[in-house]
Amino acid sequence: MTGTVDTDLHPGVEVVCLGESMVTFLPSLPGRLADVPSFARTIGGAESNVACALAGAGHTVKWVSRVGADGFGDHLVDAIAAYGVDTSGVRRDPDRPTGIYFRTATDRATDAHEVAYYRAGSAASAMAPGTLSYDDLWAGRVLHVSGITAALSDDCLALMRELTARAPGRPLVSFDVNHRPGLWRDGSGARVLLDLARGADLVFVGEDEAADAWDLHGGDAIRAALPEPATLVVKRGSAGATVYEREVGGTGRGADTGTGGTGLSVDGGADTGTRGTGLGVDIGTGGSGRGADTVTSVPALRVDVVAPVGAGDAFAAGFLSATLRGLPAAARLRHGHLMAAATLTVPGDLGTPPSRADADRLADLDDAAWGTLRLGPGWTAATEQEVRTP
C-alpha cells in the first residue's frame, strides 16, 4: 500500500475501526446452551465495540467492514450507526451471510462457558486487499484493527499484512493482539500476530495472552520482543496495566487533538502541549532512531463484575480517547480502566461510557482515592455522591 490520504477530504474523522461485527445472542438464563430457552439479540465485535465506545465518548469514528445483504446485516449497521458511528464504509455482500454467535452467561474464563460461532464463510471473511476503499481506511488520524481479522481467512490476513506494512502517510495504526487460538486451525496464530504487532504503532496485549501465545512473561519481556511499536500497552488483568512509550526523534506533520491537549503526530514527531506528551510515530524509518522507553503503570479499579466480555475492547477505546485528547500516560491508562469498568458492569459487550466530565474527574483522583474507588452496575449514570469510595 502506497500513497497518502488527503486529510482535508476527511477533516472530522478521528478513528477508523476495521473488523467483523456479528449479531450476538445472549441467554435469558444461566446454563448450558442446550438448556437455555431463549436469547436476546445484541451486537458484538472487537473493532465495532471500540468504535461504539469511542463514539459514545464524543469522538468521530468510522467503522469499515462487510456484512451480508440480509436482515442481520441490516441490524448490525443500524445498531452501530445508532451509537453515532459512521457506517458509510460498510460494504454489503449479496453472496455471503452476516456472522452470528450464541454464548452462555457464564464467565469466559471458566470451563462452563460456551460460545457457538456461525461465521465461517461470512461476508467479513471476504475482506481482502482491493475490496475496501482506502479513502475509508485512511480517513482518520488512527486506524484501529485487531488480530481477530487476520484469523478469518487468507484474504483477511493479506489485508492485515498490507495495513500493518509501514508506509509514508499512513494513519497511526493501533493493533489489539486479541489472540483467539480457536480461530487459528493451523496453529500459526502466535507467529502471525507477533509479525503484525511489529508493524503497528500502538499495540495492546494482555499479559496472559502473551504468555500463552509467545511464552513471554511480564511486560519487560513482551517489550523486548516488540521493540518496534512506539507505544506498547500491557494489560495485567486485576493488577492493572503498563504502558511503554518510546521517544522518537524527527519532525513531521502534527495533528492538533483538541484544546488543552497535545498533538498526535501521525507521520513523525510529537507536538508538545500543556497537558502531556503527544504520541509521536516515526513510520517512515520502521523504528530506526529509537530512544529510551518511559514506563508507566496504573492499578486496576475494583469493579463489581457482571460480565467480562468486551472489557478489553473498552479499555482500548478509553486509552485511545485519552490519546486523541493528548493526555499523559497515567491518564490514558486510567481512562482505559474507566471505560473497561463501564463494560464490566453490564451483561453485554457494550457499556454506556461515563460522561467526559465524570471520566476526567475520576481519572484526576489522587492515588489513594483511586485505590479505594469501587464501581458497580449503573455507576456511569450515578451522581458523584453515589460512586462508592469506602
Image: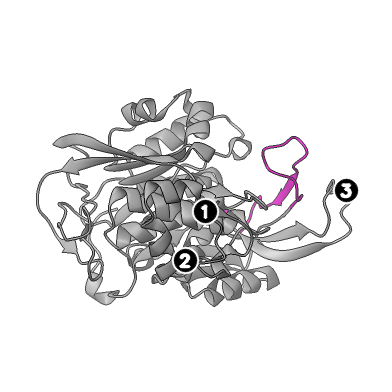
Residue at x 48%, y 70% (from the top left corner)? 56
Q: Residues within 10 Å of mark 3 (few under 14, many from 20)?
A: few
Bounds of the magenta segment? 103-128
Q: Whole-Å distance between the Cαs marked 3 and 2? A: 34 Å
Instruction: Classify residue 369 as left or right of residue 31.
Output: left
Can you see residue 46?
A: no
* Element assignment for label 3: loop
How does the figure colour the protein chain or chains?
one colour
Please name the amino acid that badge 1 sits on.
Ala
Q: Residues within 10 Å of mark 1 (few under 14, many from 20)?
A: many
Residue designated by label 1 = 340
Residue designated by label 2 = 63
Q: Position of residue 231 (x, y in %)?
A: 30, 43
Please name the amino acid that badge 2 sits on.
Trp
* Front of the two marks 1 and 2: 1
Q: Residues within 10 Å of mark 2 (few under 14, many from 20)?
A: many
Q: Nearest the camera: 296 or 130?
A: 296
Mark 1 vs mark 3: which is more N-terminal? 3
